[in-house]
Image: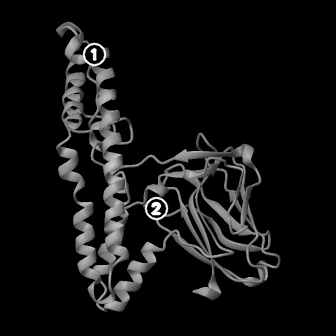
Amino acid sequence: MEKEVELSLLQNWRFQLTLSRSYLDMYMLKRKQFDERIQQDALKILKSAKPDWVMRSVTEARAVFGRWRAYAYGLPERARVLQLGEALFQSIGMRLSVAPHRAMSQSRGATLDSLDWALNDRGWWEQQFASIEKLRRSKEQMNALQAALRWEDVQTGEVYIDFGKEISLTRKTWPSGVSMEVLNAEDSVRMQSWIRGRDIARMRLSWLDHLGSAHGSPLTIRFSGLAPKVSYELMIVYGNLRLNGASRLSVNGVHEIHPHQRGPEPAEPLYFTLPARVNDSGVLEFKWEHLVEKGSLDGLTHVSELRLRKKLNR
């Protein structure tokens, strides 16, 4: 399109802005497709790892994840986005980068600073690789790798959910018969994090969006069809948001899982043991209650991931 217009239009900031967005969209689409592909290639390597050669597999997978740079830097769309960003700064002072354009922050529209952020879980996997490298015994390394690979895996009577991927915020039923219901769906919304480069460098993409509640309302989620009279391990990741208010989590109205507290920053999984005595019928109803705090949203809860695994199988 830009090859067919006059120079005066090319120098118009409105046209430059339209071009910038178009090139950025195409660049991100190509990057997303490539990042997903190399993640699948890396996971194939890791899944085929042998106990005595874990670190070799980690090295090979890390190299596969690292292919993103040569691919991204070779895309003509990336160069054009950077050119147009500078043109917009020169013409109307649009600040699309913290440096040198002096934008307020990366989370306030500084799109040039986030061009090369991961569009897969390579940051999280790098954290896992670093942890595995610190282990001396091959058996420990293999166990750590398998735990990372099985992050989303559950058996019959168990559940894993990435709330940001869910189309419906009210109900879901899994083939195993386990079902979920958000009881106060009218006050529940899907939210996304305000993230910075240091966040995306260590997080799973599933931690970037959340199921949340606003207006000081509690967030209540009921799971049914679980194994009754069984102790479960609960894993939760809270959204990494500065607005995330302190909340108290309880189950079935009889057991406090944790008192009022904020989720950790940076985001990381929290683990809790649910005693069998609170699970008489295979129904677990989780309730997050807020301390109403000063701020525009009067208390929030953001739940990115939730997993329930039976303790007796672990």
Name the N-terminal-most of marks 2 and 1: 1
Q: Any mark on residue 66, and which?
A: none
Q: Residue at x 40, y 60 (%)?
A: 203
Question: Do we see residue 71 in this rendering?
Answer: yes
Q: Position of residue 100 (x, y in %)?
A: 19, 35
Choose mark 2 or mark 1, whichever is in front: 1
Quick one: label 2, few (<14), some, or many (20+) residues within 10 Å? some
Left or right: 77, with 303 as reference point: left
State the SS at label 2.
loop
Q: Amino acid at mark 1?
A: Trp
Q: Position of residue 91 (x, y in %)?
A: 22, 17
Q: Position of residue 229 (x, y in %)?
A: 77, 83
Quote the CA–CA distance across marks 2 and 1. 39 Å
Q: Position of residue 274 (x, y in %)?
A: 68, 79
Q: Which residue is mark 2?
A: 267
Q: Which residue is mark 1?
A: 13
Rendered-image quadrant of the C terminus: bottom right
Q: Residue at x 29, y 27 (%)?
A: 20
Quick one: label 1, few (<14), some, or many (20+) residues within 10 Å? some
Residue sitting nearer the eye, 256 or 176: 176
Q: Amino acid at mark 2?
A: Ala
Task: Give above or below for 117 relative to 231.
Answer: above
Q: Residue at x 52, y 56 (%)?
A: 239
